[in-house]
Image (cartoon, grey):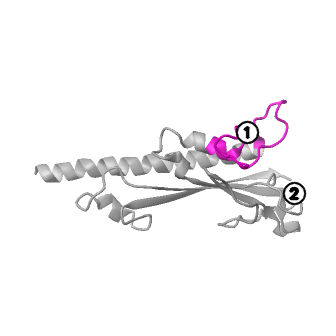
Amino acid sequence: MLPLLIMLVLNVVNLGYFFLVVVNLTGTARTATLYSIQGSSTPAASVLPGSGGASPTTNLLSVTYLAFQDMTGALWNPTGASVQVCSPINTNASGSGVNGSGASQNANCETCTSSGCGTVGTGTPTPSTDPEAPSFVLNEVDIAYSFSPLIPGQIFNIPLQAFSGVCSSGSCAFTRRARMRAMN
């Protein structure tokens, strides 16, 4: 009876950690999207925040910095996450903050990790167009995070089997997306 009880308790710990990660990533994506639209909402910071810049972990006014700080404490390695910010503040080579025109326009995306950000473009996954474009633009933040369960092993992998689409070979990957509309 004791091995069954131990297996049950250890799997409850793993499952609880999975839910902690999901809740934290969901809140982080929502907070970062809101910040990308509103900024700090102070007279001193009238310009909307950028995605991340050359150094997203030290650029205090960037959306990526906020996302990494929001994940710190609850996740084992928050700097291992990838943050994609799709916002009209991201200007492409032509100086535009959006791709397309009229009803088919969408915001430019920039993908950032702790080491830096990529080039501004459409991003992967490609952001959706807003149904009321060009008057509104859909802002998105996608966060991808990979981690190992707290208690790995063959005997205790019942939660890993339950999350077969998310977890494989001892590693789990969660992705969370938040979308909000802003007037253009």
Q: Residue pushed farthest left?
A: 1
Residue 60 location in percent, x, y? Answer: 70, 37
Between residues 152 and 140, which one lies in front from this camera angle?
152
Residue 53 location in percent, x, y? Answer: 73, 49
For mark 1, give the secondary structure: loop
Estimate the spatial distance between the alpha carbons at disc 2 and disc 1, rounded to whole Å.
26 Å
In the image, what residue occupies the spot 39% across and 63% down? 163
43 within the magenta span: yes
In the image, what residue occupies the spot 32% across and 47% down? 13
Region of the chain picked out in magenta, as a range? 38-67
Prevailing secondary structure of the magenta residues: loop
For mark 2, give the secondary structure: loop
Q: Which mark is on residue 135?
A: 2
Between residues 57 and 82, which one lies in front from this camera angle?
57
Between residues 136 and 166, which one lies in front from this camera angle?
166
Whether residue 120 sits left or right of residue 154 in the image: it is right
Q: How dense is the environment of label 2, judged by Cα within 10 Å: few (below 14), some, or many (20 and up)?
A: few
Question: Relative to residue 164, is residue 142 depicted above or below?
Answer: above
| Mark earlier in primary sequence (2, 1) | 1
Query: Is residue 31 visible to the viewer in this orientation of the structure?
Result: no
Whether residue 177 sits left or right of residue 86 in the image: it is left
- Name the front one of labels 2 and 1: 1
Residue 158 location in percent, x, y? Answer: 29, 60
117 within the magenta span: no
Question: Relative to residue 122, is residue 9 depicted above or below?
Answer: above
Query: At label 1, which amino acid type do we have?
Result: Leu
Whether residue 177 sits left or right of residue 13 in the image: it is right
In the image, what residue occupies the spot 52% across and 46% down? 78
Q: Which mark is on residue 61?
A: 1
